[in-house]
Amino acid sequence: MKILVTNDDGIFSPGVAALVEVLQHFGETVVVCPDHKRSGISHSVTLRQPLKATVVKVFGENVKSWAVNGTPADCIRLGLDVLMDKKPDVVISGMNVGATIGRDIYYSGTMAAAAEASLYQVPGMSVSIDRLSAEDMKFQWSKSLLYGLLETLFSVRLPKHVFYNINLPYLQKQDCKGIFPVAPDSSVSRYKYVELNDPDGCVYYWVKDRLSQPVMYQDGLDFAKLKEGYITISPIEGMVTQRKQLKRVEQWFPPFN
């Protein structure tokens, strides 16, 4: 098995190192990551400046790895178009420190990398950990949970046009309740702009993450199940036209047809 890895936290983040350690048990691992943190950049790509891919040796001699001055989506495109001699069997993005749930799937660079893989007809996965900070973090807990999950995912035939959003609770394996396939809870507005004043009286606006505050979740969806102690996995289809909606739109324009 050949696996392409990226993330949005930068190639020197401890999360990507933990992910590579797990994946080396399953096959050949290649890493193409942004050279610095690119969180919240969504599916943007670099168009009007050149990209540079610098060989780095942060994962040992057996793991080919490049640091790219671009976005997570850039990294996948560059890896698949240029840097890899053969298309990988799967693309995995992560491990992101901080859950990627609900509306986050639209903003996350981690998720965008998995989505970009699906555009190349390669199964993609995004892996995040439900913890707000990497300080004093025990990555061994997350590595253990992810290993068990991947044993199952790699044993089945993954559809090429689907990518998977995976969130790991920050728990030891014995405390995890299991794996729960679940839909994203898009009803929760996790981020909110707040107003700040500087010493000169100028007003600025800053995005505040309210995940640590009490939030009303919908039962049975990703916010709730992750907080209950489950690994959540959400399959997402990219670039799919909904046939029912297509028929509805066709009915709007009969005079033109």
Image: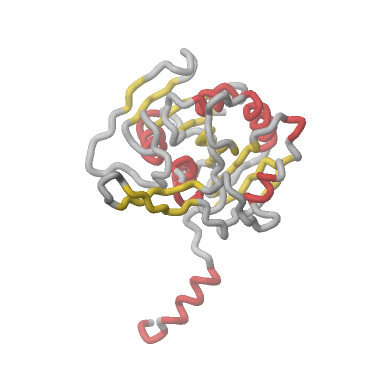
Q: Locate residue 55, reporting x and y percent.
A: 36, 20
Label tally? 0
Colouring scheme applied when the structure was drawn: secondary structure
Residue situated furthest bottom in the rendering: 255
Q: Residue at point 47% right, 81% down? A: 251
Quarter of the view holding residue 136:
top right
Q: Residue at point 42% right, 23% down? A: 65
Task: Please determine whether, in this image, residue 102 is positioned above or below residue 170.
Answer: below
Q: Locate residue 242, reporting x and y percent.
A: 53, 65
The residue nearer to you, when weighing 252 against 18, is 18
Task: Please determine whether, in this image, residue 151 is positioned above or below residue 252.
Answer: above
Q: Locate residue 10, reporting x and y percent.
A: 42, 30
Q: Which image quadrant: the C terminus?
A: bottom left
Q: Which image quadrant: the N terminus?
A: top right
Q: Residue at point 37% right, 29% down? A: 83
Quarter of the view holding residue 179:
top right
173 vs 252, left or right, is: right
Q: Residue at point 48% right, 19% down? A: 63
The residue nearer to you, when weighing 83 against 180, is 180
Residue situated furthest top in the rendering: 61
197 vs 217, left or right, is: left
The residue nearer to you, when weighing 193 against 99, is 193
